[in-house]
């Protein structure tokens, strides 16, 4: 019921007022309606309870009033402090030397100090809190105190200022009326407001301008001094063609009086004063210069030469400057042009002399080529003429060795045979040198195994080494190389035979080192060694370190052949030698690309008398009577029935007369009357079938090798090796 009488939403004063009124009413009713039933007591009790509640509410009201008073005191204190802080901030902003303004995030001015905008008296009083940033910029842009640059409008300046306002930080300079300058710094606050500082930098700008003017003045003096020290004449013109700078050298080169060169003189005026004294190398040059100077477009650099006076030549160079002015330089090139003319005359003279000398050299070269060709033909012819009787002599000696039974005569015959072998080696070396020097050497590159060549070297040289008491070691290798087998065998044979020849004690070693793309073949000996000053000469022809050696021991051509053959095959050739310790020669031979190997044919002529050649008919065609006689005696000594003939016609007549087919044909390659042994063999084979045949010759041309291989004809070189010839005969007549 109490809750119905008292509204909790009422204030404490209102609630107490209601309670007091209720209490008075109840007490009055108690006094008026007191009865014995106890109703009055109940009302009294209720009045007491209400009084107690009134006291409680009164106490709460007093506490609330105390809290309110305390809060009001604190609020008043805070307001006082805020006002003090605002006053302090305003005082602080006023004390700074720069103009200061603060705009809130909505670009509305919050506050500014008295220095902000003081340079703009017309709008200074309008800067108040609440002004927008755009209004501020507009007022500044139209103020007469703002100094705009040439061509700039208030609108363009305002647009530029608003664009800088978008940056978080902006610093720029603004020129004011009266040659004053402000530096404006604009920065964002953390809440996206804007702070603007205006600093007067007039004194700084004036100081900088004075310093710049001083530097420009110093620079002008420096440039002037530099121009005066140049050996070139320099003229500088502004964009209107007026003279603004020059040096003394210009007047000297152009022969101008001092009073003609004055500041502000137009180019056209100067040009007219000296034009009659100038000689242009091109008729169009005078007009070209005038057009270049008068042009309003961008001008490319211009250069030309002109003559001045009787003997002076000037090189002129003109170039446009950034301000559309231009500079001209004049260089005296008289000495250079005189030198060029002199050099030109000398060149003409030299060209004539060179042409004459070239003709002389061509004649000399032709003569040398003719002499070289003649030498090659002579060597070939001489070798052929020498090999003919040499072959005959070897065959005669070989036949004597089989018939002599006296030890002394046999020894003499063997020595004669050895001497003939030495002569054969010298002639072969001469032929090799001649072919290598003439460039006619034929190279046949193929893949083959080194083992076959090394085996032949071992069989050939070991007996000679053992005879001298040397240890001869050869490390065999099955490496497959790509080379010319004939040239490689000759290179290794010369190196190894030299090692055996010049080594008196110790040993000779031939070894092979495997490399990534090649093999290195080395020939070592323990001979006397080669002095360092002689190592470059040992590859010269006819050069021998042992000057007391006899011609039978060689003519000093072995290493010359090795050197030329290695250069022909493009093989690196190495020499390493120490005096009294020995020498090592080494060559590098490329490996074959595939594993296919070449196997040397089995040595012939080693079957002895196991093959019977009795009563076998051999046709011998040889135009040289001595060699024909020697071959006949040799072949008959082996049991053959020989039909010796000097020509194909004689062989045809003889075979027709006896009416018998031969078992083998042996023919010289070069017969009389330009007849060839290959033609004779082909003719006889046409008559009597595919008869085994052999060509003997001193001709070592590759073409002949190809012809014999194609015709299945054996080729044996002169001087004829009896063992090789017999081996061929035994091979084809074994049946």
Image: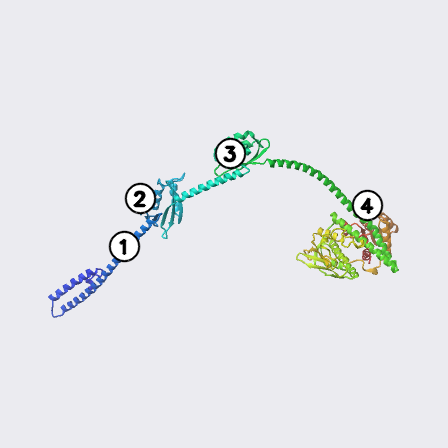
Q: What's the mark number on residue 80?
A: 1
Question: Distance of mark 2 from mark 1, alpha carbons?
Answer: 29 Å
Name the one closer to the observer, 443 or 183. Answer: 183
> Which percent across, then down, holds residue 309?
58, 31
Residue 638 visible within the image: no
Residue 378 visible within the image: yes
Name the one closer to the observer, 426 or 527. Answer: 527
Q: Which residue is label 4 attached to?
A: 674
Asked if labels 3 and 1 touch by Cβ distance under 8 angstroms, the answer is no
Asked if labels 4 and 3 touch by Cβ distance under 8 angstroms, the answer is no
Give left or right: position of 335 versus 44. right
For the residues carrying marks 4 and 2, which lies nearer the camera in this image?
2
Question: Distance of mark 1 from mark 3, alpha carbons?
Answer: 80 Å
Q: What's the mark number on residue 125?
A: 2
Q: Which numbered disc, 3 or 4, marks the residue that appears first in the sequence? A: 3
Q: Which numbered disc, 4 or 2, marks the residue that appears first in the sequence? A: 2
Question: Distance of mark 2 from mark 3, alpha carbons?
Answer: 57 Å
Give left or right: position of 701 versus 34. right
Q: What's the mark number on residue 293?
A: 3
């Amino acid at each position: 019921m109490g809750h119905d009488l008292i509204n909790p939403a009422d204030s404490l004063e209102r609630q107490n007022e209601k309670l007091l009124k209720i209490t008075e009413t109840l007490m009055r009713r108690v006094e008026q309606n007191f009865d014995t039933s106890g109703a009055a007591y109940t009302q009294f009790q209720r009045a007491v309870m209400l009084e107690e509640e009134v006291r409680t509410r009164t106490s709460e009201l007093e506490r609330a009033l105390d809290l309110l008073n305390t809060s009001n005191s604190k609020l008043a204190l805070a307001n006082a402090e805020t006002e003090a802080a605002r006053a302090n901030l305003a005082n602080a902003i006023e004390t700074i030397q720069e103009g200061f303004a603060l705009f809130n995030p909505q670009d509305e001015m919050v506050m500014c100090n008295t220095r902000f905008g003081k340079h703009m008296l017309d709008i200074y009083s309008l800067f108040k809190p609440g002004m927008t940033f755009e209004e501020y910029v507009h007022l500044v842009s139209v103020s007469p105190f703002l100094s705009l640059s040439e061509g700039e409008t208030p609108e363009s300046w305002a647009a530029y200022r608003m664009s800088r306002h978008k940056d978080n930080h902006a610093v720029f300079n603004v020129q004011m009326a009266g040659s004053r300058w402000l530096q404006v710094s604009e920065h964002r606050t953390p809440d996206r407001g804007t702070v603007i500082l205006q600093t007067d930098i007039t004194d700084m700008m004036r100081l900088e301008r004075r310093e710049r003017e001083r530097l420009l003045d110093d620079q002008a003096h420096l440039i002037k001094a530099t121009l005066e020290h140049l050996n070139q004449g320099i003229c500088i013109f502004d964009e209107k063609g007026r003279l603004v700078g020059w040096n003394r050298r210009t007047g000297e080169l152009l022969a101008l009086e001092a009073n003609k060169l004055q500041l502000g003189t137009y180019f056209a005026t100067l040009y007219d004063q000296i034009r009659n004294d100038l000689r242009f190398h091109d008729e169009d040059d005078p007009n070209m210069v005038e057009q270049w100077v008068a042009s309003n477009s961008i001008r490319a650099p211009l250069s030309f030469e002109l003559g001045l006076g009787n003997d002076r030549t000037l090189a002129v160079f003109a170039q446009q400057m950034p301000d559309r002015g231009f500079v001209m330089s004049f260089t005296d090139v008289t000495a250079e042009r005189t030198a060029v003319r002199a050099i030109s005359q000398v060149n003409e003279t030299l060209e004539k002399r060179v042409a004459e000398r070239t003709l002389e050299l061509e004649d000399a070269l032709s003569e040398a080529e003719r002499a070289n060709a003649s030498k090659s033909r002579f060597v070939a012819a001489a070798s052929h003429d020498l090999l003919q009787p040499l072959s005959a002599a070897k065959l005669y000696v070989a036949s004597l060795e089989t018939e002599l039974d006296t030890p002394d005569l046999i020894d003499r015959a063997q020595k004669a045979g050895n001497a003939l072998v030495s002569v054969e080696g010298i002639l072969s070396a001469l032929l090799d040198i001649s072919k290598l020097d003439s460039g006619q050497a034929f190279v046949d590159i193929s893949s083959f195994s080194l083992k076959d060549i090394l085996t032949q070297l071992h069989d050939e040289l070991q007996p000679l080494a053992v005879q001298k008491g040397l240890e001869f070691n050869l490390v065999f290798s099955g490496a497959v190389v790509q080379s010319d087998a004939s040239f490689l065998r000759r290179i290794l044979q010369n190196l190894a035979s030299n090692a055996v020849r010049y080594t008196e004690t110790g040993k000779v070693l031939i070894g092979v080192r495997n490399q990534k793309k090649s093999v290195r073949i080395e020939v070592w000996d323990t001979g006397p060694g080669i002095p360092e000053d002689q190592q470059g000469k040992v590859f010269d022809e006819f050069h021998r370190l042992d000057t007391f050696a006899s011609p039978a021991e060689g003519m000093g051509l072995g290493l010359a052949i090795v050197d030329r053959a290695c250069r022909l095959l493009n093989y690196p050739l190495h020499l390493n030698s120490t005096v009294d310790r020995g020498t090592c020669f080494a060559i590098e031979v490329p490996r074959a690309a595939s594993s296919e190997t070449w196997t040397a044919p089995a040595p012939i002529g080693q079957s002895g008398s196991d093959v019977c050649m009795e009563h076998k008919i051999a046709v011998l065609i040889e135009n040289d009577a001595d060699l024909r006689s020697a071959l006949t005696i040799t072949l008959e000594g082996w049991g053959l029935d020989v039909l010796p003939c000097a020509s194909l016609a004689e062989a045809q007549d003889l075979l027709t007369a006896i009416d018998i087919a031969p078992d083998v044909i042996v023919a010289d390659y070069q017969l009389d009357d330009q007849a060839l042994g290959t033609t004779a063999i082909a003719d006889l084979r046409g008559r009597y079938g595919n008869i085994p045949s052999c060509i003997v010759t001193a001709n070592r041309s590759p073409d002949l090798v190809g012809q014999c291989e194609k015709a299945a004809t054996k080729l044996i070189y002169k001087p004829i090796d009896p063992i090789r010839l017999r081996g061929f005969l035994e091979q084809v007549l074994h049946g």
